[in-house]
Image (cartoon, coloured by chain):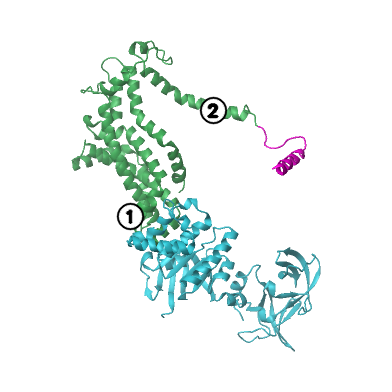
Amino acid sequence: MSDRSSLVAASASRLQPGPAGRKPRRMLSPRNIMLYGTLLVAAIYYLIPLYVMVVTSLKGMPEVRLGNIFSPPLEITFEPWVKAWSQACTGLNCDGLSRGFWNSVLITIPSTLISIAVASVNGYALANWRFKGSEVFFTILIVGAFIPYQVMIYPIVIVLRELGIYGTLTGLIIVHTIFGMPILTLLFRNYFAGLPEELFKAARIDGAGFWAIYLRIMAPMSLPIFVVAMILQITGIWNDFLFGVVFTRPEYYPMTVQLNNIVNSVQGVKEYNVNMAATILTGAVPLIVYFVSGRLFVRGIAAGAVKG
Amino acid sequence: MTNTSVSIKDLSLNFGAVSVLRNLNLDIRDGEFLVLLGSSGCGKSTLLNCIAGLLEISEGQIFIKDRNVTWEEPKDRGIGMVFQSYALYPQMSVEKNLSFGLKVAKLPQADIDKRIARAAEILQIQPLLKRKPAELSGGQRQRVAIGRALVRDVDVFLFDEPLSNLDAKLRSELRVEIKRLHQSLKNTMIYVTHDQIEAMTLADRIAIMKNGVIQQLDSPDTIYNAPRNLFVAGFIGSPSMNFLRGEVAASDTGPIFVSDTVWVSLDGYRAGEALQPGRKAVLGVRPEHIAVNGETAELHEAVVDIEEPMGADNLLWLKYAGQTISVRVNGARRFAPGAKVRLGFDPSLASLFDAETELRI
């Protein structure tokens, strides 16, 4: 030990005066001010509306009428939240957003699961089991992602009507599943194509077939991309308004449509606090999904979606 | 026929208009270690994939153990394969990696356990069985990958550049292990590599490939000392063979090779055909077959350009007859740049090629 410390001391004494070791960095350099300043401004820009919403939703109506939208509530009340959830009126029924919430859950869960299940198998087949015309098939599917939804709405209404499922939850679930297909297939195909080809070859030599390779090799390796697909689908379907309003009847309206009906109702007083609470409630699900799986989301996007 | 393990007959492979393998014939004996050697893009890995059944061939047939497997699935061909990138299933433990193929084949569990135990013992990976591939070093991973081929209990092992991802020290260690494995198992092994040391040390026979065609199929010894054409001669050996362009001439003492201002006696060269005077030819001499300042040294004057001491031996780059040639001498012999030396050629160790056809004379 003593030998070593004397050695260190000796080498320390060999230093010449002047710069040595790590170069010191100033916290308040122009670069840092620019960087953190921009980030701060952007953060405030996005957070202020949220702040206003939360604050307003916790105020009673008399306080809201004062018009100081930035001031914190003098008296915190949760009544607007309760009202938004269970009492607010949309059209004829006055049972609040809860009905829309459960509709949205019933729409989102099957649509997400079915679309991911089908699209991942599609992507796997397109990436690993190239068949005659698979490239053409893939191109057609991708083109599908660029056709504006509005063009397809009326034909789909007719198709659903002929199938006898127009206006039902089943119909809406099928529509969501189909519309998720191009982008999800692209996502999965690119991810699977990025996995080492030799893994696939090794599995084939081990005797695994189409489904065994997918279920036991490819899918377990691809958790990040499944999470990405799940987030895309949950948020996309939850936030959907257009399909919800077009393809369902009022009793099956998803939460977004119901929110619109509450906020835009023309009769009575505008209850801003209830509206804010209803909006936050509706946005809460995608928000929670992001918070819970944000890290995986970024990793999956970086790994799968970029590589072509 | 019974002695043949793998037999490839008139195999061709085209990707669209691109022809990758052309009319290839190859018979591999039972228990033989065959190395497919070539630079990248020569079709050696493609050929291996065809044998494995991972690529559909365009024409021809493949027989393994006298069974026509041309249309068979990879798993039904009786082969095991080891890949350059190991290709271990990342989410499975080593044990699961080894057992995956056996489970797919629905073998009884007792049988699976027995085979894994045997493979683990041979490769000495028993302590690793519960670990995931990510927790293993490169050498350990490749050992597991070999184990995965081993448990399949197959006739033919296919290796696709298995050591190329390892560092130099590990590579030479595993090379010895693969050789030991072959000696104890006595399976047929087909091994693809671009590393000529691996080819020379491991192979019973080497097939040197270029542009989808086998240039020479012979024992490492023959390939090294009697390459069949100019490509093989230049490809095998590092630094590569020295080539002198010139022509064959006659002299009182027998045929000689004349290049520029110098001549070399061909007395003692075992020519496959008559050495007709006037024939344009290329003389190839390996760096270690040139004597410097010794008893056999003739009157060939050369000047030392650069010296590369490598410890065991010393590589000299010399200016001779208007070109640069390399000579390997004992590491203890040192030469200063600019020094004049005399060289001697042993015709019996040299190779002579026709300048037109590039084939060995």
Amino acid type at mark 1: Trp
Judge whether B11 appears above or below A114 on screen: below
Q: Along the horizontal axis of the image, is A295 left or right of A5?
A: left
Mark identifier at residue B55: none
Mark 1 highlights which residue? A211
The cyan-tinted chain is B
Q: Residue at 34% of width from left, 47% of height from top? A: A119
Q: Secondary structure at mark 1?
A: helix
Q: CA distance from mark 2 to mark 1?
A: 50 Å
Q: Position of residue B282 (x, y in %)?
A: 66, 76
Task: Report crowding for label 1: few under 14, some 14 to 19, many 20 or more residues within 10 A (C-alpha).
Answer: few
**Within the magenta stretch, is there residue A20?**
yes
Residue B100, x across and y down, in percent: 38, 58
B198 horizontally vs B336: left or right: left
The amino acid type found where label 2 is placed reads Thr
Q: Is residue B124 above or below residue A81?
A: below
**Residue nearest the viewer, comparing B273 with B97:** B97
Image quarter (top left, top right, bottom left or bottom right) of the N terminus of chain B: bottom left
- Image colour for chain A is green
Q: Quadrant of residue B219?
A: bottom right
On the image, which quarter does residue B352 sit in?
bottom right
Name the chain under label 1: A
Q: Position of residue B123 (x, y in %)?
A: 48, 62
Q: Chain of mark 2?
A: A
Which residue is rendered at x = 34% and y = 56% of the image? A210
Residue where numbered disc 2 is placed: A38
Q: Reading the chain from its start, which is encountered first: label 2 or label 1?
A: 2
Image coords of residue A299 (percent x, y): 46, 41
Residue A171 appears in the rendering: yes
Q: Which residues are magenta?
A: A1-24
Magenta residue check for B138: no
